[in-house]
Image: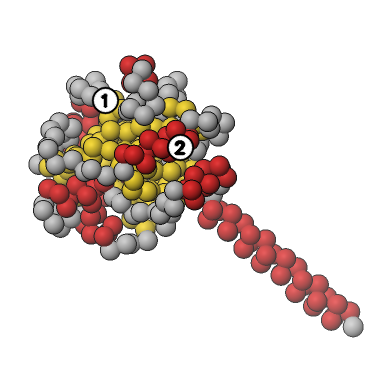
Amino acid sequence: MINKINLALTALAFLVLVIYLEDKTSTEKFEIKSPYYMADLDTSENIKLHFRRFEWKYIIDRKMMHRIISELSTYMELDDHISTEARDRGPQNAFYMVRSVYMDNSGLGSYHEKMAGCDFRKKMRVRTYEGDVSDDTKVFVEIKRKKGDTIIKDRVVMPYGSCQNIFDQGVYNLDQFPVGDRDFLKEFLWTYKRNCMRPLLNVSYKRCPFVDKVRKRFRVTFDYDIDSVLVNGEINFQGETNKKSGDIIMEVKYDGMLPSWFYNILKKYSLSRSSFSKYCFGVQKVFDF
C-alpha cells in the first residue's frame, strides 16, 4: 500500500514538473528577447534599437488615408520625430522621409524568400531618416527578422562615414564600436558575407506617423510615394525616379492587443490585411518583373 502511495506521489510530482516546464517554455517563446543589449548606449535621444512587435499592413488610397487620419486624431498624435515645419502642414500632410539601402545577392535570395512565403526570414538594410547625407549623418544598420506576424528588429546607430568604411574594407575592424554593437555587427557582417550579399536597392518613401496618446507602443504609419533605385554595391541614399507607387501602405505596429476603437475603424472600412513588401515592390520595378 505504501509503495503504491509513493508511486502515485512520484507520478504526481513528475506531472507537476512537466506542466511547469511546458508553461515556462511557452512563456519564453512568447517573450522573444533580443540577443543584444546596449548597456553603454547613450539613450538621451530616445532611440529604440532593439524591440519585438506585431505588424499589420493595409493597402489604401489617399481618400481613405484622410478619412482614417481624421478618426485617429481623437486617440493619437503625430510622433515626436515630425519636425515643426512638417507639423505646420497639418496631420493630413505631415511626413518625414525614410531611405533604406537593402542587401541582397545576385540571386535575389531575400526577395525570393519573401515571395515564397518563408515563415522565418530576415532583411538586412541600412536606413536613414535624414534628407541630406554627409559623413556625420546618423544611419541605422539593421536586421529585421520576421516569424509569422512577429517582427524582431535589432539595429546599431552610427555615422554614415563609419558605415561606409565597414562596407568598403575587406577586413572589418570593429574595435571602435562598443561591445554590444560589435556582437550585432559580427552577425550582420557574417550573414552578409556568407550569403554573398551587397548593397542592392535604395527604397525611399514619405511616412506620416501617429502614436497613441496613452499607449506609446501602439503606432500607425502611412507610407506613400514609394520609390526605388539600384545602388550598384554602394550605401547610396540618393536618386529617385518618376515611377513611384500610387499605393499608400498603412502599417499598424503594436506589442500587445489592438485597442478596441482601432479595431472598430478596421471594421468600419472593411479593411483587409496585405503582405505588401516595399523591398519586393522595388525589385519588381527596377528589374521589370
Which of the two residues, 281 or 177, is positioned nearer the viewer here?
Answer: 281
Which of the two residues, 204 or 165, is positioned nearer the viewer here?
Answer: 204
Q: Helix or strand or loop: what does disc 2 sit on?
A: strand
Please, which colouring scheme is shown?
secondary structure
Please tell me in which quadrant of the rendered image residue 226 appears: top left
| Whole-percent x, y for residue 232 in the image | 9, 41
| Whole-percent x, y for residue 140 in the image | 30, 33
Characterize the local packing of mark 1: few (<14), some (14-19) or many (20 or more) Cα atoms within 10 angstroms: some
Q: Check contact, mark 2 vs mark 1: CB within 8 A.
A: no
Q: Can you identify the residue that label 1 sits on?
A: 130
Q: Amino acid at mark 2?
A: Arg
- Quarter of the picture containing the N terminus is bottom right
Q: Could you tell me which residue is drawn at 36 percent across and 17 percent down?
A: 88
| Whole-percent x, y for residue 129 in the image | 29, 28
Rounded to the nearest angstrom, the CA distance separating label 2 from label 1 is: 21 Å
Q: Helix or strand or loop: what does disc 1 sit on?
A: loop
Outermost residue on the right side: it is: 1
Q: Could you tell me which residue is drawn at 57 percent across and 45 percent down?
A: 260
Residue 194 appears in the picture as rendered = no
- Is tag 2's residue or tag 1's residue first in the polypeptide sequence? 1
Q: Can you identify the residue that label 2 sits on?
A: 219
- Quarter of the picture containing the C terminus is bottom left
